[in-house]
């Protein structure tokens, strides 16, 4: 069986995509790193391997050798599901939010900044409060999703429009799967999987 992995650095930033015939039961994995990304991977001693399949746990490993585009990674420890949930990918799309709580009505346009399986950050000209709940349209999944989102904080922004971070609330399994596929698709080939 062929396994697909995102190779993530110690800061949680994806650095490459790799494939392997070695599953999570192995102590040493041979990972074929795509094209020119091997140098980015080798700038790290430790990396996390995050499988595109939820059945395979994320694992931290130490790079022990390289032959061409194939690296050998020694498993150090299993990581919890939060690694996969919090893997954020930069992505820009236009969308809308709709209020669930808060004093405003109607809809407000937003521009996404990044997306993870657990949340999103987006630019929005309408002032939002920490703890406020909105529904946001995610148009880059195989079918557009309307997800309840709790505003966590306003992040620093280099733009004239405020940048908000939010976490998805009460997602069902199918919604999580669709968002995960979109997030991984952004890393694997630069566009969401459809």
Image (spheres, grey):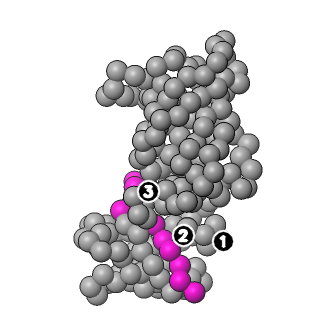
Task: Report the mark closest to the observer, 3 or 1.
Answer: 3
Q: Residues within 10 Å of mark 3 (few under 14, many from 20)?
A: some
Distance (Cα) linking label 3 and label 2 = 18 Å
Magenta residues?
Answer: 1-15
Asked if residue 78 shows in the view, the reply is yes
Task: Report the mark closest to the observer, 3 or 2.
Answer: 3
Quarter of the picture holding the C terminus: bottom right
**Residue at the top extreme of this rendering:** 103
Secondary structure under tag 3 reads loop
Instruction: Please name the residue shown 43% across and 46% down the image.
Output: 91
**Relative side of 136 to 184, left or right:** right
The residue that mark 3 highlights is: 191
Residue 47 at x, y percent in the picture: 41, 67
Distance (Cα) linking label 1 and label 2 = 8 Å
Distance (Cα) linking label 3 and label 1 = 23 Å
Name the mark on residue 51. 2
Secondary structure under tag 1 reads loop
Count of marks overlaid on the render:
3
**Relative side of 166 to 38, left or right:** right
Q: Is residue 125 magenta?
A: no
Instruction: Please say if 85 is above or below 75.
Output: above
Instruction: Please say if 157 is above or below 66.
Output: above
Q: Is the Cβ of the residue at disc 1 closer than 8 Å to that at disc 2?
A: yes
Residue 39 at x, y percent in the picture: 25, 70
Residues 12 and 144: in front is 144
Instruction: Please name the residue shown 70% across and 21% down the image.
Output: 101
Q: Residues within 10 Å of mark 1 (few under 14, many from 20)?
A: few
Mark earlier in primary sequence (3, 1): 1
Residue 183 at x, y percent in the picture: 51, 55
């Amino acid at each position: 069986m062929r396994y697909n992995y995102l190779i993530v650095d110690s800061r949680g930033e994806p650095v490459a995509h790799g494939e392997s015939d070695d599953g999570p039961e192995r102590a040493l994995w041979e990972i074929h790193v795509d094209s020119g990304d091997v140098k980015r991977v080798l700038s790290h001693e430790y990396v996390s391997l995050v499988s595109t399949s939820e059945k395979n746990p994320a694992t931290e490993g130490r790079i022990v050798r390289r032959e061409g585009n194939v690296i050998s990674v020694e498993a150090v420890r299993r990581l919890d599901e939060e690694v996969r949930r919090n893997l954020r990918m930069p992505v820009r799309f236009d969308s809308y939010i709709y209020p669930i709580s808060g004093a405003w009505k109607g809809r407000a346009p937003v521009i996404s900044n990044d997306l993870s399986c657990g949340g999103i950050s987006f630019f929005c000209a309408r002032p939002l409060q920490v703890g406020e709940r909105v529904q946001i349209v995610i148009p880059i999944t195989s079918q557009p999703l309307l997800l309840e989102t709790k505003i966590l904080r306003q992040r620093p922004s280099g733009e004239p429009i405020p940048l908000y971070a939010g976490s998805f609330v009460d997602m069902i399994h199918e919604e999580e799967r669709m968002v995960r596929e979109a997030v991984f698709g952004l890393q694997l080939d630069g566009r969401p999987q459809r």
